Amino acid sequence: MIINSPKNIALLNSLIISIIAGCAFVILTDSFNDINVTSLLIFVAFIFVSSFALINFSVTRFISEKIKVIYSTIGLVRPKPDKKSKVKGDVLEIVNQVVLRWSEEKKKEIEELKEMAAYRREFLGNISHEIKTPIFNIQGYVHTLLEGGLKDDSINTKFLQKSVKSINRMIALVDDLEEISKLESDDIQLNEEVFNLYELTKEVIDFMEHKALEYKTTISINTTSSSSVMVNADKKRVRQVLINLIDNAIKYGNLEDNRIRISFYNFQNNYLVEVSDNGMGIAEENIKRVFERFYRTELSRTRDKGGTGLGLAIVKHIIEAHRQTISVRSSVGKGTTFSFTLKTA
Ligand code: ADP
C-alpha cells in the first residue's frame, strides 16, 4: 500500500489496531467456544471505524496541514510523488528534499549579498583613500599660505599651482567614478555608428599634443596601417578608450625618449588596434590586475602622475560593452602594448 495520504496512513493503522483488539477480545474471553462471533465482529468494526476516524483526523490536522504550511512558507508548490523514485510516496522525505533545496538557495543568496557588501566596503575604502590625498595636500598649502606664505613670493604662486593640481585630481576622480558607475549599471546605452577610426585617432593625438610635448613624447600611427579604418562602434566611448590608453602610455613612458605607436590590423570581421610604448613596462605578476579598479603597480606609484586608478577599468568596460576584447603584453623596462578589437563596419 502506498502510504502517501492521511487516509492511507489511517487505514493501515486502524487495520492493525482492530486486529490487535480482536485478538485481545478473544484472549480476554474465557473460552473460544463461548465467543459470540457477532459481538466480536461488531467490536472489531467499532474499533476499526473509531480508530480510523481518530487517526485520519490527527494526521490531517497535525501533520498534513503543517506540511502544507511549510510548503506555502517556503513558496514552493508541493511536488507530486515521483513514481520511479525510491522514496516513492514518502511525504517526509519529499519535505526534507524541498527544505534542503530551499536552504541551499538561501545560502547562495546570503553568500552573494556578503560578496556585494565586501565589494562596497572595498570600493568606499578606495574612494576615501584616493580623495584624502588631494584634500590633505590642499589643506596643507592653504594653511601655509594663510600663515604668512601669501606674502612670500618664493612659495605663494607655487603653492596655489599645487592646489590647482590637487583640485584637478579630485575632479578627474569624480569624473571617472561617474563614468564607471554608469558603465557598471546594467543598462549601458551604446550609440553605435560607422566611423573612420584612423581619423578619430588623429583627432585624439592632436588633443593630447600638449601633454605629449610636456613629457617629451612622440605619438605616431604605424605607417603600414591603412588610412581607412571603418568600424562600427560608439565613437564617443572609443575616443575615451584611446585617450585613456595614450594618456597611460605618456605617463608611464620612457623618461628619455618616449615613443608611442598606434597600429591597426584588419581581420575581416574585426580590427585589432594596438597602442604601444617603450616605457617602464608592467611586471608579469601585475599584468592580470591592471584592469582592476584602483589597482596601480608599485613602479607607477613611485612616479605619481596623479592617476585615478580607474582608467583601465573604464577602458575594459567600454570594450566589453561592445562585446569585444582587450589584452595587454608588457616587459619591464622595455614597454607595453595594449590591444583591443572593434567590429569592422
Ligand atoms: P591610473 O590612473 O593609475 O593610470 P589606470 O587604470 O589607467 O590607472 O592604470 C592602472 C595601472 O596600470 C597604472 O597605475 C599603472 O601601474 C599600470 N599601467 C597602465 N598603463 C601602463 C603603461 N602603458 N605602462 C606601464 N604601466 C601601465
Image: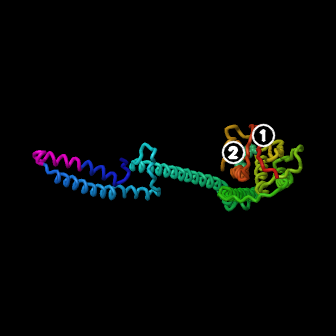
* Distance of label 2 from label 1 (alpha carbons): 15 Å
Percent coordinates x, y for residue 160 in the rendering: 73, 59
Image point (46%, 44%), residue name: 84
Count of numbered circles on the image: 2
Query: For this rendering, which residue is in front, 326 or 268?
Result: 268
Specify which label sits upstream in the sequence, 2 or 1.
2
Query: Which secondary structure dominates the residues rendered in magenta?
Result: helix
- CB atoms of marks 2 and 1 within 8 Å: no
Q: Tell me if residue 68 can be seen.
A: yes
Q: Is residue 151 magenta?
A: no
Residue 240: mark = none
**Are there few (<14), some (14-19), or many (20+) residues within 10 Å of tag 1?**
many
Asked which secondary structure carries label 1, the reply is: strand
Q: Could you tell me the amino acid type at mark 2?
A: Val
- From where the camera sits, is residue 163 visible? no
Q: Nearer the viewer, residue 19 or 271?
A: 19
Location of residue 181 by image quarter: bottom right
Magenta region, residue range: 18-34
Residue at the spot x=74%, y=42% of the render? 328
From the image, tell me which residue sits under label 1.
335
| Left or right: 60 as drawn, with respect to 148 | left
Q: How is the image coloured?
A: rainbow
Q: Nearer the viewer, residue 206 or 56?
A: 56
Q: Amino acid at mark 1?
A: Gly
Q: Is mark 2 within 8 Å of ligand 1?
A: yes
Q: Residue 114: give x, y in percent of width and height.
A: 53, 51
Label 1, ligand 1: CB separation under 8 Å = yes
User: What label sits on residue 290 in the rendered view?
Assistant: 2
The answer to whether residue 32 is magenta is yes
User: Is 183 positioned to the left or the right of 279 in the image?
Assistant: left
Q: 10 Å neighbourhood of mark 2: few (<14), some, or many (≥20)?
A: some
